[in-house]
Amino acid sequence: MTKRESLLARDAFEEWRKDPEYLAAYDALEEEFALAEALIKARAQASMTQEDVAKAMGTTQAAIARLESGRTMPSTRTLQRFADATGTKLRIRFEKPKSSSRASKAS
């Protein structure tokens, strides 16, 4: 992606976020996006390709691509294998929601 394309994508994203329906859908997927971003970041910091991680985990590059896309919700065992493959430590933590409306739904 070129710098110009990146700017256009960012502008489009900012415009879409003004739409309440888009914003609600985006927020609903926040955790999946955060997990996908963390997986990609761990792999990049390890200077590994998807193929490298796949070999270390005993799986396929396509499986790693699915993990990083956020389209699948991996098990903790899979996440631990990914952490081991990238030389990172898996941490899972619970945090209070950012908005009080989500907290009231959980009660």
Image (cartoon, helix red, strand yellow):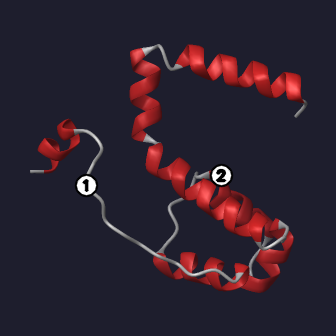
Residue drawn at (47%, 77%) of the image: 76
Q: x and y percent of residue 84 in the render?
A: 65, 86
Residue drawn at (77%, 85%) of the image: 56
Q: CA distance from mark 2 to mark 1?
A: 26 Å
Q: x and y percent of residue 91 in the render?
A: 47, 76
> Which residue is the site of mark 1?
96
Q: Quadrant of residue 44?
A: bottom right
Characterize the local packing of mark 1: few (<14), some (14-19) or many (20 or more) Cα atoms within 10 angstroms.
few
Nearest to the observer: residue 39 or residue 67 = 39
Q: Residue furthest left?
A: 107
Q: Quadrant of residue 41?
A: bottom right
Q: Is residue 76 left or right of residue 95?
A: right
Instruction: Name the mark nearer the viewer: 2 or 1.
Output: 1
Residue drawn at (39%, 17%) of the image: 20
What amino acid type is highlighted by mark number 1?
Answer: Lys
Res. 69 mark: 2
What amino acid type is highlighted by mark number 2?
Answer: Ser
Q: For numbered disc 1, what is the local secondary structure? A: loop
Q: x and y percent of residue 1 in the render?
A: 88, 34
Q: Is residue 80 above or below residue 32?
A: below
